[in-house]
Image (spheres, helix red, strand yellow):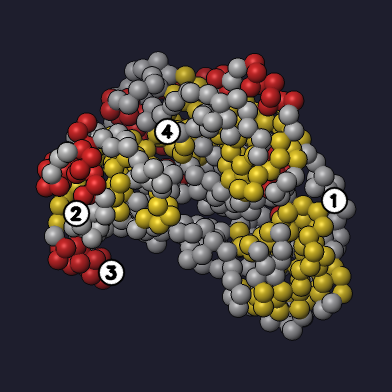
Amino acid sequence: MYPISMQSFGVHAILVEWPNKVDENILDDILAFIQDLKKNRLDEKEWELVPSYNSLTLIQRAKPIDFEPFCKNLQEWYNNKGKTKAAQKFLWRLPVCYDLDFGIDLQEVSEVLNISISEIILMHTSNIYTVYSIGFLPGFMYLGGLPKALETSRKTTPRLKIEKGAVGLAGKQTGLYPQESPGGWNIIGNCSVSIFNAKNEPPCFVNVGDKIQFNSISRAEYDLHKIEGEVGIYQLEKIEVDA
Amino acid sequence: MLKLLKSGFFTTLQDLGRFGYRNKGVPVSGVMDAETVSKINMLLANISNAPVMEITMTGPTAIFEADTFIVLGGAEMSVTLNNKPIYNYKVYQVYKGDILSYGRLEKGFRNYLAIKDGFSSEKILGSSSLYFPLTKNSCLKENDSIRYEKHPAFEPKISELKVDSFLNERVLHIHKGPEFQILNDKQLEQLFIKTFTVAKENNRMAYQLHEMIEGHCFSMLTSATMPGTIQFTPAGKLIILMKDGQTTGGYPRIFQLSDKAINILAQKKYGDNISFKLI
């Protein structure tokens, strides 16, 4: 249990906030609350629940929310959620090819950080990251847990076009571009798996709270995954994580 | 089919939006001016979610390939059907071979073309709204053909609607947003005394405002945003997120537009003036 605060966010939404920090226990508590709300309290057809770091936004599609009675209920539901667990979380091992063809900024990052390319890859792949939020673009994950040694500043001039699947570093963050987009991150590799596919239900297999680990693959493996992906036989490695 | 001989500046297909995927980063999309669309779909006895064509700034020239009924609404553009002028909020019967042609923008920014039973297109994640990268393009292109059902007969209950136009409305009603409390007296004064101008950077994702106010150095964790959220950048810029806007953001959310204010803003273009009023 944490002290939580609630405020109206327009007439269709309520923002619930937990203590202001990046903390996995807080994220777990938010996800457990979501699970309880979905199971016992709110109709998923009418409500959207958007978790992000230390907040949960509840959006009612059509009708305005009667703020005061709803907040009273919400606080009560939170107090009584008891030991409801968050939904099953997974660790996803995402294959990334760190070839210089993809890792167009690897050389520069290596010089700036004064770490060899192989060491950068080793550090980037040995760490396990937590998905704190999904937003900005469909399927774009905000990952926490980058080793301090890999923190870099953004590129001074953003690129107009970054390839789909590009894996990048920027400040305290690492992540991957689910679609081609403009962006200012330092690109160090490319993931052979599509994180977001509008034809799938759900369109993005990753949920907030899941874990991500990058797995270094060769160019040949990358090309093979791409072909397997196209014919739909590629099996992504996922491992259940205890809450 | 309705075949586009010319596409216009930004002509897109939209319904009321794509709901249920914001936790995966998918914007809701949907028509920018929902009030207008509910009226014109109603005139055709369509369901409220029937897809319409959203026509921004300059419109298409298009040929109907089957008989049906249409209604226009929203921005005033000089539109003709077989070279004869037609008007907003009035049901027109169209026949195979008829040519619809959009001319000058007179007032507002977005016109809507509703068709009996709606345009039909592939639904992606429960919605026909075009949004790249979920759909191949965000807008329709020259020579695109958009499917609709043939309707040789239809008796409208009301064939014309007198509409209280909000195209001249400049005041946007707003609610306090989650980070409202970071605003100091000077910023508040600037926000409520100033008239703001719509910047060149305005589209279905967001409207930026030209005038800046005093900046800030508040930093926050990324959190949810919605259509109508006013973001406040450290430099003092105001960005109003619209229907294709991102689902999360890291800038303080100082205000939230009312539903009506979103419709009003959707009809504003580069250089138009607006001001804010707290609800």
Is residue B91 toward the left or the right of residue A85 in the image? right
Labels 3 and 1 positioned on one and the same chain? no
What whole-number distance in Å separates the C-alpha atoms at marks 2 and 1? 60 Å
Image quadrant assignment for residue A77? top left
- Label 2 sits on what residue type? Tyr
Nearest to N terminus: mark 3 or mark 2: 2
**Residue assigned mark 2:** A98
| Crowd band around label 1 with a 10 angstrom C-alpha radius: few (<14), some (14–19), many (20+) | few
- Position of B90 relative to B32 (above/below): below
**Residue assigned mark 1:** B163
Q: Which mark is residue B222?
A: 4
**Residue assigned mark 3:** A230
Q: Which mark is residue A225?
A: none
What whole-number distance in Å separates the C-alpha atoms at marks 3 and 2? 21 Å
| Crowd band around label 2 with a 10 angstrom C-alpha radius: few (<14), some (14–19), many (20+) | many
Is residue B267 toward the left or the right of residue B234 in the image? right
